[in-house]
């Protein structure tokens, strides 16, 4: 991994140099302003100094850390998860055989999908009070009963954007924030003909900001990269009549320092919407950890992505059931398209299909 220092009059000039020497996947490590030609701090000219590294594909990625590279917080989180899993297994053994068939099979199925022992016990107990064993053997009756039990299980809220509002998109690495913003921008800008501005402070990887800029250029939407909260406010203050969509760098849910950096931007910008983007191909516990660590930022809504890439969304739905309402669901890579308002998405149908395994 090659670390280099660049000095330029503007950040844009520095980024051009970095891109030419280190390539599209260069990673920004540090940025700061320096003065040259001053005497005792008086006078002189202000420059931007940037530290960047060339991304080496052979370097172990954050997502594939070896045990020795894991932070103490990650190790503690894993231990807690292990203890929780053991506790759940003990509860499962204690509850085994408490219901007649087919209710017992249903209880086991719910656990397989991501419910804990007490949650599955509660659901099946409610079912046994509403229907007989014979009724439960009828596929139509059991599906209807399950749909009723899970009615409004997922909180949903339709989001209507208006001029001057700001929306920031946060979440772990690789959940699809940039593509999701492009989809929402396409709907608002191309379909609804609303004035937009897209900002990005994903400056840690040059190619990420470049991808967002490409989408913006195609849709003829103004785009800018921001490097500090103050710069963001300068741009926003001069843009009163546009809906502003803000992209952020992906952050591990265990990296509290980087998450606090996003929190600083949010406190300064004061957006009307803070969307936590969640990949539904992840396990329930992973999603719960993301919600836990990003919550201090002030999440207003959840967006579920990659629903087309998994056969089961039950676990992630269990994780968000007590969180903020779901605003959008994405079901593909197409831009524009492949995004649905959560208010129009039939979560109950997905749940029924998974529970009865059809």
Image: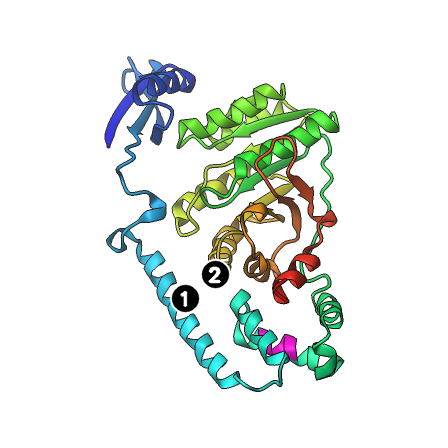
Q: Nearer the viewer, residue 320 or 126?
A: 126
Count of marks, rendered view: 2
Q: Are marks 2 and 1 in contact (CB under 8 Å)?
A: yes
Residue 209 location (% of width, % of height): 47, 27
Q: Is residue 268 above or below residue 195?
A: below
Q: Nearer the viewer, residue 7 or 284?
A: 284
Task: Give the quadrant of residue 8.
Answer: top left
Residue 3 location (% of width, % of height): 25, 29
Q: Nearer the viewer, residue 193 or 266?
A: 193
Tell me which residue sits at (64%, 77%) in the image: 124
Q: Is residue 65 left or right of residue 279?
A: left
The part of the chain drawn in magenta is 120-124
Could you tell me what secondary structure mostly forms the magenta stretch?
A: helix
Residue tagged 2:
285
Residue tagged 1:
81
Tell me which residue sits at (30%, 27%) in the image: 51
| First of labels 2, 1 by sequence position | 1
Please state, as top left, top right, bottom left or bottom right, where the N terminus lies in the image. top left
Query: How packed is label 2: few (under 14 Cα within 10 Å), some, or many (20 or more)?
Result: some
Q: Is residue 191 left or right of residue 170?
A: right
Residue 198 location (% of width, % of height): 58, 27
Q: Is residue 74 above or below residue 255?
A: below
**Which numbered disc covers residue 212?**
none
Residue 113 location (% of width, % of height): 54, 65
Q: Is residue 117 visible?
A: yes
Dot 2 lies on which element? helix
Dot 1 lies on which element? helix
The reply to whether the magenta stretch includes residue 189 is: no
């Amino acid at each position: 991994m090659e670390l280099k220092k660049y000095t330029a009059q503007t950040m844009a000039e520095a980024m051009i140099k970095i891109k030419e020497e280190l390539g599209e996947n260069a990673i920004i490590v540090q940025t700061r302003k320096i003065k040259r030609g001053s005497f005792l701090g008086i006078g002189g000219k202000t420059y931007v100094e940037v530290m960047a590294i060339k991304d080496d594909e052979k370097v172990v990625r954050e997502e594939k850390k070896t045990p020795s590279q894991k932070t103490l917080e990650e190790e503690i989180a894993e231990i807690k998860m292990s203890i929780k899993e053991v506790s759940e297994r003990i509860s499962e053994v204690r509850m085994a055989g408490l219901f007649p068939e087919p209710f017992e099979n249903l209880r086991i199925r719910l656990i397989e999908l991501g419910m804990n022992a007490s949650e599955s016990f509660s659901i099946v107990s409610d079912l046994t009070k509403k229907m007989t064993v014979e009724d439960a053997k009828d596929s139509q009756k059991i599906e209807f009963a399950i749909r009723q039990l899970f009615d409004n299980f997922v909180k949903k809220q339709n989001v209507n954007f208006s001029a001057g509002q700001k929306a920031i998109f946060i979440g772990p690495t690789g959940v699809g924030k940039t593509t999701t913003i492009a989809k929402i921008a396409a709907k608002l800008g191309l379909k609804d003909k609303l004035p937009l501005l897209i900002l990005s402070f994903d400056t840690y990887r040059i190619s990420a900001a470049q991808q967002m800029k490409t989408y913006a250029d195609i849709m003829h939407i103004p785009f800018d990269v921001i490097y500090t909260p103050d710069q963001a406010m300068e741009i926003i203050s001069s843009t009163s009549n546009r809906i502003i969509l803000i992209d952020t760098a992906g952050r591990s849910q265990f990296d509290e320092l980087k998450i606090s950096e996003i929190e600083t931007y949010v406190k300064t910008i004061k957006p009307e919407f803070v969307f936590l983007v969640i990949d539904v191909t992840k396990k329930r516990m992973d999603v719960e950890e993301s919600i836990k660590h990003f919550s201090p930022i002030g999440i207003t809504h959840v967006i579920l992505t990659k629903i087309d890439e998994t056969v089961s969304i039950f676990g992630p739905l269990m994780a968000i059931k007590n969180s903020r309402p779901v605003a959008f669901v994405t079901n593909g890579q197409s831009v524009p398209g492949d995004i649905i308002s959560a208010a129009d998405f039939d979560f109950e149908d997905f749940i029924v299909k998974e529970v009865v395994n059809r």
